[in-house]
Image: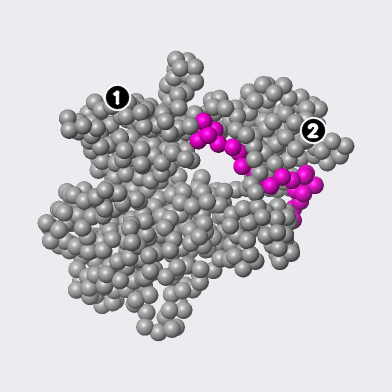
Amino acid sequence: MSTAHVGLPAWSTRSADETAVQNLVDALGCPHAIAQILVSRAISDAAAAQTFFHPTLDDLLDPMLMLDMEIAVARIQHAVRSSEPILIYGDYDVDGTTATVLLKTAIERIAPKETPATVTYHVPHRIREGYGMQNGVLGQAAASGVRLVISVDTGIRAFAAAEEATALGMDLIVTDHHLPDGAIGIPEAVAVLNPAQQNCPYPFKHLCGAAVAFKLAHALLLAATETEEQRTKLKHGLIPSFLKLVAIATIADSVPLEGENRVIATLGLRELRNPVQPGLRALMQVAQIPINRPPTATEVGFRLAPRINAAGRMDIAGDVVELFLTKDAARATHLAEKLNRLNDERRATEAKALEAIEIQLTALRDTLGDYLAECIILDDPEWHRGVLGILASRVVDRTGRPAIVMTHEDGHSHGSGRSIAGFHLLDALSAIHEPVSESNTPLFTRFGGHAHAVGFSMPSDRTNLLRERMQRYGAPRLTAEIMTPPLECDAELLLSDLTQSFYDWLTRCEPFGIGNREPIFLTRALTLCAPVRFIKERHICLQLQRSGQTTHISALGWSRTTDWPARCVEMALDTGSLVDVAYRLKAKTNPQFPGLELELVDLRLA
């Protein structure tokens, strides 16, 4: 899908204190642009830069700093000592399934060999159960003898489920990272572990759900050690192993890759080199990720995570938990191949829905002349609930507006939303949910999420009401500045700056993601030294050089969010055209043609 015209953004270059930049250049021996990137990201001294480049296990925060951690550890220890059956209540995405694996493994590790812990798990079916804890599942657990339930990546708004657990005689520990309800607070539970909750002293607030579960796992394992030798073995053995799954979840859940998340992602990616666990190894193989080197964040985000998520989107997410727990290589291969097939099915389902979305968006533009300054809301009863979030992301790419995509089933609407920077989508849903008068009823039957992504359910006959309320809420807030933010470039470079040494320094800044975005560079006054080459009629390749020089570099424009062929026609680009380019610097992937190339972000006539 290509981006409709939403106005071309202005370009700007991030400012950085030149004295601090030069001090880093002198201390590190790095290129000026690398120091400029670090300073603009609040890394302004050599010690902080070294931590940024080389995080270690010592940079992980103490799990006991988290509110209620001591209480949670004590309650789980009591359950293990008393041989109480424990239920882990998970979620169906990467975050929830990996969290389930981590916590189950840790609890089983601390149990004596002669009396192993009884730890079961429930991962809800996306279609049949939806997101969150269900009373029926809790009732079945209580009937089977469970007296302790631990939620992972869910539960912070599970007020009814918490009451049901109490009524059934079960204790509840909530581990979650989603935002609590601003008005009601948190559910009644033995312990609530969530750094985002009020009064939690944990210094880093942006962990994913699996990372919160990992903190509990880490605390449990630490409490079980008695000697310095055991603590050293834990630190350098089991903890790095756990970080593999935490890193996958951290990258997949799009939390900011800064602070402790950067430590987790960097160390976890490093540990993913040559994985030993059969399921992880098999999944990396079907995803065609080499297992003789650490994968990149891009490979995890676009190859590994979609296959894990495919289970929850299209079938049963419990297969993911089994995959990461099994020690049987043949079973692991079977499950990994199943996830691969489900991902192919997901992609086909998504592609079909995108065709219908393109028709709806075209109709909107034909009717309105351009998209209004509001959240785009699309719905179709034929769309699969498992791909709504992906579809919403595509609409955001297409329109430059926040988007909600819904489907309908048995009189109920199920929706997923994605947003743009500057528009807090959960705040929007919270605002429009409440009745505007005593005669109105709340809009949603359930909803939740965070600034950039939400999910909800409601009666289908409220669809128009949702559109009306979102229009009223969004119109005054979705300003031109928010919808067409300036393109921030990290540094302005000459072609002569783009050396292999510079690229090697750039890779030290990885992993890239939200909070540590991949740098965008700006180079001005380049000459197009050959006609534009079109690739599959959708993408472009430009050959660029500095005027008066003979060396040139390739610039590739991939039309995921920009219709590059149309832009080239609009700009009348031809041999000799003089252009300014904003780009990301990439290494060529074909080993027969080594070197560097540009990935276009934006293009202007000079």
Which of the 4 quarters of the picture holds residue 166? bottom left
Coordinates of residue 229 in the picture (x, y in percent): 44, 83
Residue 179 vs residue 284, the one in the foreground: 179
Residue lying furthest right: 548
Dot label at residue 514: none
543 left or right, relative to 72: right
Q: Is residue 213 above or below residue 348?
A: below
Coordinates of residue 354 in the picture (x, y in percent): 45, 28
Residue lying furthest top: 367
Q: Residue at x 63, y 64 (%)?
A: 45
Q: Is residue 390 above or below residue 184?
A: above
361 left or right, relative to 79: right
Label 1: few (<14), some or many (≥20) within 10 Å?
A: few
519 left or right, relative to 138: right
Q: Which residues are magenta?
A: 480-501
Tell whether position 227 is magenta.
no
Q: Residue at x 48, y 40 (%)?
A: 421
Residue 94 visible here: yes
What residue type is disc 2 on? Thr
Task: Report helix, strand or loop for mark 1.
Answer: helix
Task: Report helix, strand or loop for mark 2.
Answer: strand
How many badges with numbers are in the image?
2
Label 2 sits on residue: 527
Tell whether position 492 is magenta.
yes
Which of the 4 quarters of the picture holds residue 573? top right
Coordinates of residue 344 in the picture (x, y in percent): 45, 38
What residue type is disc 1 on? Asn
Q: Is residue 34 above or below residue 371?
A: below
Q: Residue at x 31, y 40 (%)?
A: 430
Label 1 sits on residue: 464
Give me the C-alpha separation between circle 1 and circle 2. Answer: 52 Å
Quadrant occupied by the C terminus: top right
